[in-house]
């Protein structure tokens, strides 16, 4: 009996995180209500504070979930990964839920934003994933992996934002090919 309850609790939690991620991506954090999330998840809105405390707690769970996706991409064994890490990145950019990153970014840059520090954790995970694939020897002289990771993550966020705003103007396949030419061979 307790096992079934635990499964239902985990399933409810997962449904709420998934629904919140989709709605935060679509409407933004501030414009999404408990009612919206509960309706989309098909779960009582009272479940949200029970599982997460409040909306910010739910956002933390959404961001933690996305950080795990990023870290899993970078930590999977080389034989399970694409030989071209950009294939993974470009595939990740195309996922519908990655729209969440652009929507939250707009809110996170505001000085009083309640999501600012949580979004900063997401950026840190992205930089960590890039650094995990960098061979320091392959970088141009005078380049440090930390700075390279900042530049690459910034470029990818910019590409992603441009594509989300004007998909007809951004050819992700051409961007992928260009990045492959520009990036050092030493990316694992």
Image (cartoon, rainbow, N blue to C red):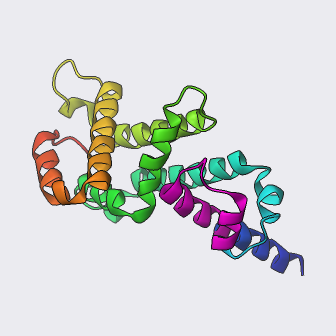
The residue shown at (22%, 56%) is 84
- Magenta region, main secondary structure: helix
Task: Count numbered badges in the picture.
Answer: 0
Q: Report the span colored magenta.
A: 15-40
Is 15 situated above or below 138? below
Quick check: 137 left or right of 110? left
- Residue 62 percent coordinates (x, y): 60, 54
Residue 1 placed where, x, y %? 90, 82
Q: Nearer the viewer, residue 44 or 32?
A: 32
Name the residue rendered at 76%, 75% in the picture.
Answer: 7
Of 141 and 151, nearer the camera is 151
Give coordinates of residue 46: x percent, y percent: 83, 64
Q: Residue at x 57, y 55 (%)?
A: 65
Magenta highlight on residue 2: no
Q: Is residue 25 magenta?
A: yes
**Residue reaching furthest to the right:** 1
169 or 78: which is nearer to us? Answer: 169
In the figure, 137 relative to 7: above or below? Answer: above
């Amino acid at each position: 009996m307790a096992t079934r309850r635990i499964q239902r609790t985990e399933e409810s939690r997962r449904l709420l995180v998934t629904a919140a991620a989709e709605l935060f991506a679509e409407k933004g954090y501030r414009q999404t209500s408990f009612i919206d999330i509960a309706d989309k998840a098909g779960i009582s809105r009272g479940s949200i504070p029970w599982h997460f405390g409040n909306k910010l707690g739910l956002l933390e769970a959404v961001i933690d979930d996305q950080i795990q996706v990023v870290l899993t991409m970078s930590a999977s064994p080389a034989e399970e990964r694409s030989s071209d890490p950009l294939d993974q990145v470009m595939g990740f950019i195309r996922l519908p839920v990655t729209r969440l990153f652009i929507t939250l970014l707009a809110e996170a840059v505001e000085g009083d934003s309640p999501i600012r520090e949580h979004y900063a954790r997401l950026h840190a995970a992205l930089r960590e994933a890039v650094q995990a694939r960098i061979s320091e020897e392959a970088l141009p002289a005078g380049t440090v992996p930390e700075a390279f990771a900042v530049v690459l993550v910034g470029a990818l966020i910019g590409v992603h934002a441009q594509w989300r705003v004007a998909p007809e103007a951004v050819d992700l396949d051409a961007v992928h090919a260009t990045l492959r030419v520009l990036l050092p061979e030493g990316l694992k």
